[in-house]
Image (cartoon, helix red, strand yellow):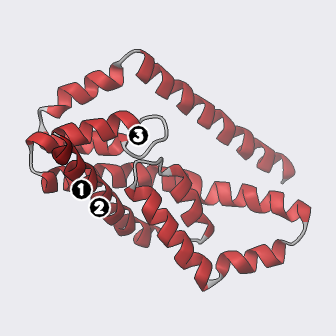
């Protein structure tokens, strides 16, 4: 059992390292910029693709700029809607991948230091759940990377059926605000 946990932890670390490497390659080779520039002319597709990239720590900045540029020349509500659909898909991928495994690893670490029951009680309390929803929604709506919000929501054991609409609404509001700010600046 111990070797399985160690294997899962190593697998998670390798996947994170590969995703960082992949993101760096995308940024250094301008592939990401070219994808955004090619899809920017297509309001719906461009918003959807930029929305997917809006969720990750490594691609949030160019996706935010792209969503702002698309919103300047198209309907802010359509950009926000299709960007939110893409961002929700990106968040769902992160949620399915990170939520349970990261929480289990963290609980395993906490078990070694004691106080496991108090921490479990805190994580399951109603006030903590509302706080994680509030913080998670703010993080998802902001241009901050959504991985942190997914981890917070994972601690509170949010079901996928609740996470999907929550992610969509939070991303819609965030992308809508980006579009409004982009139009106000120009």
Would residue 79 appear left or right of 159 to someone viewing this image?
left
Q: Are marks 2 and 1 in contact (CB under 8 Å)?
A: yes
Question: Who's the residue at 58% across and 62% down the image?
Answer: 152
Mark closest to the chain's N terminus, 3 or 1: 3
Question: Which residue in the structure is indicated by mark 2?
Answer: 173
Question: Who's the residue at 27% across and 26% down the image?
Answer: 35
Residue 99, horizontal then vertical, whole percent: 58, 58
Residue 174, horizontal then vertical, whole percent: 32, 56
Residue 10 found in image quarter: top right
Find residue 176 and name its label. Answer: 1
Distance of mark 2 from mark 1, alpha carbons? 5 Å
Question: Who's the residue at 42% across and 57% down the image?
Answer: 140
Residue 177 found in image quarter: bottom left
Would residue 69 appear left or right of 27 to someone viewing this image?
left
Mark closest to the chain's N terminus, 3 or 2: 3
Question: Which residue in the structure is indicated by mark 3?
Answer: 60
Circle 2: element type? helix
Farthest residue to the front: give it: 185
């Amino acid at each position: 059992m111990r070797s399985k946990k160690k294997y899962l932890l190593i697998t998670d670390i390798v996947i994170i390292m590969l995703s960082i490497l992949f993101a760096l390659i995308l940024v250094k080779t301008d592939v990401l910029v070219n994808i955004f520039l090619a899809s920017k002319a297509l309001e719906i597709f461009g918003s959807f693709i930029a929305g997917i990239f809006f969720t990750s720590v490594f691609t949030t900045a160019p996706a935010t700029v792209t969503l702002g540029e698309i919103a300047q020349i198209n309907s802010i509500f359509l950009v926000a809607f299709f960007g939110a659909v893409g961002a929700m898909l990106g968040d769902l991928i992160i949620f399915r991948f990170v939520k349970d495994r990261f929480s289990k690893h963290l609980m395993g670490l906490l078990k070694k230091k004691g106080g496991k029951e108090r921490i479990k009680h805190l994580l399951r309390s109603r006030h903590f759940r509302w706080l994680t929803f509030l913080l998670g929604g703010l993080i998802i709506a902001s241009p901050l990377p959504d991985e942190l919000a997914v981890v917070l929501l994972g601690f509170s054991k949010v079901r996928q059926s609740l996470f999907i609409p929550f992610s969509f609404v939070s991303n819609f509001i965030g992308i809508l605000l980006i579009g409004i700010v982009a139009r106000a600046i120009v």
